[in-house]
Amino acid sequence: MTKAFLTAVLSLLLTTALAQSADPYLWLEDVSGERALAWVREQNSRAEKVFAADPRYDALRARFLEVLDSRAKIPYVTRMGPDYYNFWRDARNPRGLWRRTPVTEYAKTEPRWETVLDLDALARSENESWVWKPPVCLRPARRDDPYDRCMLQLSRGGADAIVAREFDLRSKTFVADGFSVPEAKTEIDWDDRDHLWIGTDFGPGSLTSSGYARIAKRWKRGTPLADAQTVFSGETTDVAIAAYKEHDGPVRNWIYRGLSVREQEYFALIEGRPVKLDLPRDVNVRVFHDWLLLRTQSAWKPAGRVFAAGSLLAIKCNALLGGSRDLVVLYEPTERRVMQSFAVTRSAVLINELDNVRSRLSEALFDGKQWTNRIVPTPADQQIAVVTADHEFDDYLLTAQGFTTPTTLHAARIGAKRWEDFVAVKALPALFDASGLVTEQFEAKSKDGTRIPYFIVHRQDVTMDGSTPTLLQGYGGFSISELPYYSPIVGRGWLEASGIVVHANIRGGGEFGPQWHKTAQREGRQKTFDDFSAVADDVIRRGFTSAAHLGIEGGSQGGLLVTGTMVQHPDLLGAVVAQVPLTDMLRYHKLLAGASWMGEYGNPDVDADRDFIAKYSPYQNVKADAKYPPIFIVTSTRDDRVHPGHARKLAARMLEQGHDVLYFENIEGGHAGSADNAQAARMWAQTFTYLAQRLGLQPGN
């Protein structure tokens, strides 16, 4: 052995020893290590005994499973030519059925469903714990023709990594010697019947540091994957690379290069050569016929014009490629009105707007000469969302719902003049007793004076003496908005027993556009905790509840939110539930997909970033001499997005410090925390039993 080799080995051993001394629970990051799993089994056993001893637990689990397995659920669909496809789970099909019905059948009370794939039967025959992921299907030459080929995406235990296999929709069988991709975090699309665009694990050096594809290739049927033609290569520091096909416009094939959470580059593949679009890195691109739709994330000033962050712009594709900046404004936000999302149909762009976190829908149409906008008549007191739209058809499906208003699915067409023109085709029954419940919207003032709106659902006759058990939920990241929705789980688990539910619209989300999100990125992350605690304090100040009766719950980034709030404001809280949480923010970028979030949180390897991250990272900031509210931490062994080590290590450290901690880890389930309805019912029964125990909620409270 050379001196250089020995020096390198000694350096590695020293670095490892220092890391172990600084973090005595690094061994819990070994996902399937026997020592770590023994610790998990011990904690699970302790948690199971706690829940088994509470009669509320089995009762809640049965009621939740009844909801999840109910055949009264709305079968949400994807349009594929003349058919609607739906993935369905119930008591008889816990893993699920992929099925289809003609579009003309769907509105019937009992549509004629045809099973395309029985996932339970497949899992049994292959002895695999398959969990469904949305398939990628080949569009036929004509829009009214039936689809006949898909790449099915199957996950073992609910992980993000998938196995992709070609499937024949006519024979309802896997294609012999068809396209097949081993387990990986794969991005895939059809180019034509005999070629796939693919980004996957091609071997050493082919992945980014986030664990996603770094290389995009075109793969020809009948040839080895290793022989696929490379069309684009990114950098290891990128988040992900993907090639995909658009079915309208002068350019059909595209490359997406993800640079960070909200930064990307787009390349048009012209005669096999990638041509980069000259756009700011935070502009999102969508094709609409021969137009490009550009969604800005920050103020943009091309050619002397100024477009606000959160605008939706349109420009002819060839014009942009030729250097033009002849941009048309389809939507421009105001301070409290922003675009939440948009969808395309054959002749219009549907724009879903939030007006102080309340929905409005509009259509943007191009008549061949100019663009026009018109408001779509929808109820002012319900949350509206377009759930099914396709660029080849002008009919679409949208939902209307509220915290206490069951979700209704409506069929519509572009040009509808009245809400009465929308046909209610499916509706949830009332799955919990909402009598006497009201929804109000208030605002809290955050530490820096910013007004933070929140919704609160409570009994009309609530006693304002601070005694009502209250659940505060939030997220606060990645521009994801917390909007009113109908949840039978929350209804049965909390509202029916006269508990209060609060939804906080804190910064980091997208409720008021890109700036609402950006303000809480990186060094601004502390604002999410300030906003959330301000809402908690406001609910207490108004007399709805008190600290002893206030619980908080959140998952993933929401898990970071609630654990960080617990560390900073333990005096405001009576209980905490953290699901699949981020907690070790000084190592998150080294765990699974964590590196892809550095645009959101910062890079702990950079001193300046590490300084502001270290101030709020829950794992590093919990202290033995602090008095924290009791906490229930739940995660999944098969979560390959947020590493279960985050949850494990925080639980272990807090237990060592003598705090009141309960921990449960589902062996499968992925980032959702559950792989089937029974597991989901168990997770939510655990959550609401724990909160009821700690906050004093009783049936009929």
Image: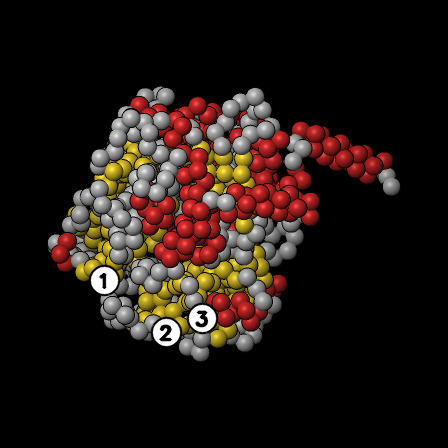
Residue at x 51% of width, y 53% of height: 669
In three-dimensional space, the C-alpha distance between marks 1 and 2, rounded to whole angstroms, equals: 19 Å
Residue at x 58% of width, y 31% of height: 654
Identity of the amino acid at label 2? Glu
Residue 425's label in the rendered image is 1
Secondary structure at badge 3 equals strand
Please state which of residues 410 and 170 is positioned toward the viewer in this rendering: 410
The residue that disc 2 covers is: 114
In three-dimensional space, the C-alpha distance between marks 3 and 2, rounded to whole angstroms, equals: 9 Å
Quadrant of the rendering where the N terminus is positioned: top right
The residue that disc 3 covers is: 117
Identity of the amino acid at label 3? Leu
Q: Quadrant of residue 168?
A: bottom left
Identity of the amino acid at label 1? Val
Q: Is residue 590 above or below residue 488?
A: above
Q: Is residue 243 above or below residue 514?
A: below
Q: Are marks 1 and 2 in contact (CB under 8 Å)?
A: no
| Residue 280, horizontal then vertical, whole percent | 40, 40
Please state which of residues 111 and 466 is positioned toward the viewer in this rendering: 466
Q: Is residue 2 above or below residue 389?
A: above
- Report how many numbered discs are placed on residues in the image: 3
Q: Within 10 Å of the Cα at label 1, are there few (<14), some (14-19), or many (20+) other Cα atoms?
A: some
Name, please, the residue furthest toward the right: 1
